[in-house]
Image (cartoon, rainbow, N blue to C red):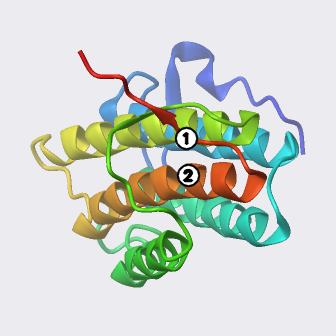
Amino acid sequence: MKIYTKAGDDGTTGLLGSGRVSKDDPRIDAYGTVDELNALLGVARSAGGLDADLDAMLARVQDELFAVGAALADPNPAGRFHNAVSGDLAGRLEAAIDRLEADLPPLTRFILPGGSPAASQIHLARTVCRRAERLVVHLGRQPGVDVPSDLVTYLNRLSDFLFVLARAVNHRSGVEDVPWSGL
């Protein structure tokens, strides 16, 4: 199979199921940003600084993000991938957040993205996750577009998870979070 098909040379791309849309369609913007998020998590994992437990958590999230992308690429509510993300995934993230927070010092002030290189990369991924969430919400507001609510919930919870994960990476690495000095 060739990697290039030339089908997109006209500025369109295919969706799962059938149909083509412009490459600047809100749907493509949303799942392209999810892909960007997944790549950033790959960078964080490959750069080192994560213990096996935290790396396994991120590996699972990367797998889940493929399901998010597939759901976004399938515009048909009855399509095979449209409902690929269930509320169980957000629940799993909540459990992971609770587990990680149990080992962290209480958060008493705002923190800046930073600390260890791995935590900084996870903070960057968190900001891209928030952008993906905004784009998915925007997509869902388009006339005639169905976006499962579990996608928005998952991305919202994922950004929370990434924030706590960055703190856990710093904590386990013996690196302090960077406190905001205020105004």
Q: Can residue 142 be spotted in the picture?
A: yes
Numbered circle sitting on residue 167: 2
Tell me which residue sits at (41%, 31%) in the image: 29
Q: Dividing the image into 4 quarters, which one contains the C terminus?
A: top left
11 lies above or below 159: above
Q: CA distance from mark 1 to mark 2?
A: 7 Å
Sequence-wise, the earlier of marks 1 and 2 is: 2
Q: Secondary structure at mark 2?
A: helix
Q: Residues within 10 Å of mark 1 (few under 14, many from 20)?
A: many
Instruction: Tell us which disc is closer to us: 1 or 2.
Output: 1
Q: Amino acid at mark 2?
A: Arg
Residue 20: x and y in percent read 44, 37
Asked whether the residues under the numbered discs 1 and 2 touch, taking CB atoms below 8 Å apart as contact, a structural biologist would say yes
Q: Can residue 17 be spotted in the picture?
A: no
Q: Amino acid at mark 1?
A: Asp
Numbered circle sitting on residue 27: none
Numbered circle sitting on residue 177: 1
80 lies above or below 126: below
Q: Residues within 10 Å of mark 2 (few under 14, many from 20)?
A: many
Residue 3: x and y in percent read 84, 35
Task: Give residue 148's quadrant in the image.
Answer: bottom left
Tell me which residue sits at (36%, 23%) in the image: 181
